[in-house]
Each structure stands twice: as structure tokens, then as C-alpha cells.
Image (cartoon, helix red, strand yellow):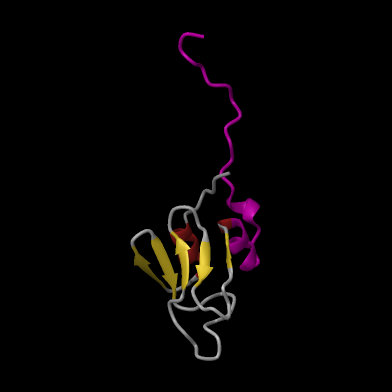
Amino acid sequence: MSFNITPNQFAAEIGWKTQKRGNWLTLKKCPFCGGGESEDVFTFAIHALDGNYFCHRSKCGEKGNFWKLIETTGRNPRDYWEKENKKKKFIYGR
């Protein structure tokens, strides 16, 4: 399954403040724990290519995939699906 939006574009659409670190985006606040009582910042990481995520805070430890992250925001992940082209493709030599 592929999406028609990247994790970086999705974070921008939501309005999340991020920092890029290699192939990872770190959010200023974890959407699950909000940084906890100590209000930790930039502990939530989303992989920029596949959308897998996790919170580094031991009391939170939330992790999952891009589908679940989209659901967390109250949006429908199906709205972001890449529509598959169901036309048969010509393969030379067959």
C-alpha cells in the first residue's frame, strides 16, 4: 500500500513543528503524550520515507505505522491512499 502524501507533507498539513534528522522527522510534541509532565520536546520521531513512528519517552513508548498516525489525527487514511492503476500494462515479448 502506498500513500499519495509523504510523512513530511502530512506533518506540514497538520501544522506540526518538525526538525529533520537524516531520514527522520522529530516533532516538537508527541501527539500521544504531549511530552508528559516534564513537557519534553522533540522526543517523537517519524521515519520520513515509510511513516513508521515512535516516542522516545519511556513512559509513553507509543509506536506504529503511517496508517495509525493518520488515524490518530482524526483523519481517514483511505483519503491518502495512492489509487492503483488497474489497467493491464503491455509487456513486450508476451
Query: Vertical placement of 58 versus 83: above or below?
Result: below
- The residue drawn where x is 46% and y is 12% is 92
Which quadrant would residue 25 be assigned to in this image? bottom left
- The residue drawn where x is 59% and y is 48% is 81
Query: Vertical placement of 20 versus 39: above or below?
Result: above
- 79 magenta-colored: yes
Please provide percent x and percent y for residue 72: 63, 67
Number of disc labels: 0
Region in magenta: 67-94
Which of the image's four quarters has the N terminus? top right
Q: Nearer the viewer, residue 52 or 71?
A: 52
- 56 magenta-colored: no
Which quadrant would residue 19 be assigned to in this image? bottom left
Residue at the far top in the pictured view: 93
Please provide percent x and percent y for residue 86: 61, 29
Please provide percent x and percent y for residue 93: 47, 8
- The residue drawn where x is 37% and y is 58% is 23
